[in-house]
Amino acid sequence: FNLCAREVSQSIEMADAKQIAKCVKEGGKKGVELAGCADLGGLEFFTTQMQEPKGDLDLLQMCMDAANKEVDPNEEESKGGSGEVGKMLLSAGDNGLALINYVPASKADKVNAEEWMAATLKEVGGGDVKKSSPSTCVAYVAEDKATGRFVLKDKDTCQAQSVQFLKAKGLFPQADEEEDDWVPDESADIEW
């Protein structure tokens, strides 16, 4: 029995290690994309979705850390580099929605992470704020089908509310039919 339990434990650890690696990879790639968009378009704040954490707050934090990591010039593939970009990451899982935002110190005069998160959660009736500071907030919105609270609906609502908050602060581009600016395609998973 002990041998079997040990094998199951090792199998779980390997699955966790694989999931962690996927999250770090996704976060690193998203960081490069966001930094590139910021460099090209001058945008300072983004709201985007992450797939790999599947609603897990710890894994979503790993994505954020990987996105904000300094780019290592010795690595074959660039990862991270968006530490100077404010961002809201959302990840939907089977039982709820994980959210985390980050405001770099250089942009603290423009946005407060606590206000950003509160505005994002307002339309879904709030959420459970797990960590809160002026530079970063972590929250979770649990699904509750009995009260009509569904993860996918909350994800879309929160994403739209986050963008609306940034627009109200003048930190998100408004559509201008006269301009012919570059806009990333849908495969970039970046919400404007």
Image (spheres, rainbow, N blue to C red):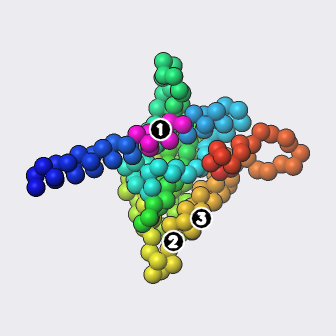
Out of 153 and 119, give the one closest to the viewer.
Answer: 153
> Mark 2 and mark 1: span between their CA atoms?
28 Å
In which quadrant of the rendered view does residue 161 lie?
bottom right
Give the mark toward the camera: 2 or 1.
Answer: 1
- Residue 181 located left or right of residue 53: right
> Mark 2 and mark 3: span between their CA atoms?
11 Å
What segment carries the magenta color? 21-29
In which quadrant of the rendered view does residue 127 lie?
bottom left
The numbered disc on residue 25 is 1
- Residue 177 located left or right of residue 99: right
Residue 10 visible somewhere in the drawing = yes
- Residue 101 located left or right of residue 181: left
Look at mark 3 in the image and give the residue it sits on.
Answer: 157
- Identity of the amino acid at label 2? Phe
Q: Determine crowd level at label 3: few under 14, some 14-19, many 20+ residues with C-alpha closer than 10 A.
A: some
**Residue at the bottom extreme, as displayed:** 146
